[in-house]
Image: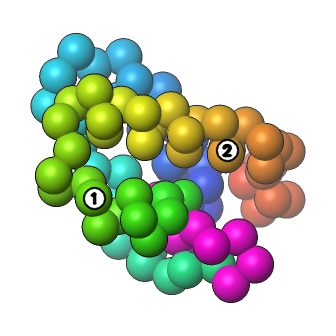
Amino acid sequence: MSAATRLAGRTREVLALEAQLPSPCISVCRMGEASGLCEGCWRTLDEIRAWSRLDDAGKRVVWARIAERLAAAEPLPAEDAA
């Protein structure tokens, strides 16, 4: 299962939480040169830097952006289709 597939599943679960949103980090920490996003968590460097200072509302915004990015990227790469 690819990072994008795992992250898509976590995104749905996390956005349903009321509080204490977890970090999207899945320990696949590589920045995509073309996208400017981490290939593991699909966050920008600014979002990664700010994470520990964000309240739950701010974290929810970041998770929603990740969900939007994943949706815009669908269909997921062929390795995810299986």
Res 37 quadrant in image: bottom right
- In the rendered view, does 8 fall on the left or right side of 12? right
Residue located beneath label 1 in the image: 50
- In the rendered view, does 67 fall on the left or right side of 73? left
Task: Where is residue 31? Give x, y as percent.
Answer: 55, 80
Q: Tell me which residue sits at (51%, 82%) in the image.
A: 30
Badge number at residue 70: 2
For marks 2 and 1, give the CA distance. 21 Å
Identify the magenta region: 33-41
Task: Where is residue 75? Give x, y as percent.
Answer: 85, 45
Q: Nearer the viewer, mark 2 or mark 1?
A: 1
21 in magenta: no
Screen quadrant of the N terminus: bottom right
Q: Main secondary structure of the magenta part?
A: loop
36 in magenta: yes
Sequence order check, earlier mark of 2 and 1:
1
Res 36 quadrant in image: bottom right
The residue nearer to you, when weighing 13 against 48, is: 48
Kind of residue at disc 1: Ala
